[in-house]
Image: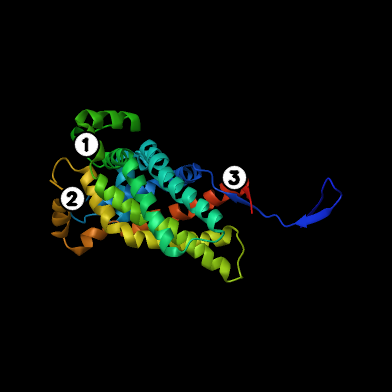
Amino acid sequence: MNSNVSPAGVCFSYNMQENRISRWYFGGVSSSAAACLTHPLDLIKVHLQTQQEVRLRMIGMTVNVVRREGYLALYSGLSASLCRQMTYSLSRFAIYETIRDRINRENKTLMPFYQKVLLGAFGGFAGGLIGTPADLVNVRMQNDVKLPAELRRNYAHVLDGLLRVWKEGIFKLFSGATMASVRGALVSIGQLSCYDQSKQLVLATGYFTDNILTHFLASVFAGGCAIILCQPLDVVKTRIMNSKLEYRSVLHCLTETAKLGPKAFYKGLVPAAIRLIPQTVFTFIFLEQLKQHFGLVVVT
C-alpha cells in the first residue's frame, strides 16, 4: 500500500504490484547456457539415433567416442549447438512469451491451457524453421567423430559448416525443415505450454511459492511431456539431416525407419530424456533467474 498527497493536499492511497517479465532474448540466452551443460548428452543421443542397427547403448557409445577421439570430442559441434539455441530457442521463446505476456496484461487474467498449446505450437514451428540450418550443421558436426576419416565433413565451426552446406545448394540448408518445424512445435507444447500450466497448478496448491523448487518441479514435468511428444520425430529428423541422399523424402525416411521395427523410432530415448529433461530444467531455472533479476518491470 502506497500513499501520496495530491497538489490540492488530498491524500489518497493505491495498491501497486510490480512484476517482472522476460525480455525477448532471455529464452535464447538461458537455452544456450543450458546447452553448454548438456551438450555431451546431445551428442551421444545423435550417435545412437544414426546407428543403422543397435550395436551400442548409451554408456558403450560414450566410451567408444572418448577412446577414439578423446574427451573433447564430447563437445564436437558446440558452436553449432549454441547457434541453434540462438536461432531456434530464441525465436520460439520470444514469440511465445511476448504474445502470452501481452494477452495476459490485456485480459488481466492468465491464458487458458488450450491457448497456451496453440501459441506454443506456433512459436515452436516458427523457431524450428528458423533454426533448421544451424540444427543441420549441429547434427553433422556431432556425428562426424564416429565416421571414418575419409568420410568426415570436418567443419571447422558452425559458420564454416553453414557456408559449405550453402555451396551444396541453398535448399540443402533446410533439409529436414518440415520435421524440424513439427518437432519444434511439439517440443514447445511440451516445454513452454506445459511448464506454464504446471507452474500455475503448483502455485495454486498454496504449498509452494514462486521459487527455484517450483521452477524445478514444473520444468521436470515439462521435460517429460516434451520427450514423449517429440522422440519419434526427433529420430526421423536426425536421420534426414545426417543423410547423404539416402532418403528421397520424409515419407521414405519414415518407411525405412519403420522397417527396423517400432523401437527404431525410440532409439536414443534414454539419453534423449537424460539430455532433454535436465536441459529443460536448466533452461527454465536460468530463465526465471534472468527474469527476476533483469526482467522488464511492469506495474499491475
Given residues 182 and 34, the one toward you in this image is 182
Which of label 3 and label 1 is nearer to you? 3
Sequence-wise, which precedes: disc 2 or disc 1?
1
Given residues 142 and 19, the one toward you in this image is 19
Residue 133, given in percent of the width and then of the height, sits at: 30, 38
Label 1 SS: helix
Label 2 SS: helix
Q: Is residue 192 above or below residue 240?
A: below
Quarter of the image where the N terminus is located? bottom right
In this rendering, position of residue 277 left or right of residue 52: right
Residue 191, given in percent of the width and then of the height, sits at: 42, 57
Residue 151, given in percent of the width and then of the height, sits at: 19, 35
Tag 2 residue: 250
Sequence-wise, which precedes: disc 2 or disc 3?
2
Distance, label 2 to label 1, CA atoms, is 14 Å
Give residue 129's quadrant in the image.
Answer: top left
In this rendering, position of residue 204 left or right of residue 11: left
Residue 257, given in percent of the width and then of the height, sits at: 17, 56
Tag 1 residue: 172
Tag 3 residue: 296
Q: Amino acid at mark 2?
A: Val
Would residue 30 be visible to someone looking at this image? yes
Distance, label 3 to label 1, CA atoms, is 39 Å
Q: Amino acid at mark 3?
A: Leu
Residue at 16% x, 40% y: name it: 244
Which label was assigned to residue 141?
A: none
Q: Residues within 10 Å of mark 1 (few under 14, many from 20)?
A: some
Q: Residues within 10 Å of mark 2 (few under 14, many from 20)?
A: some
Sequence-wise, which precedes: disc 3 or disc 1?
1
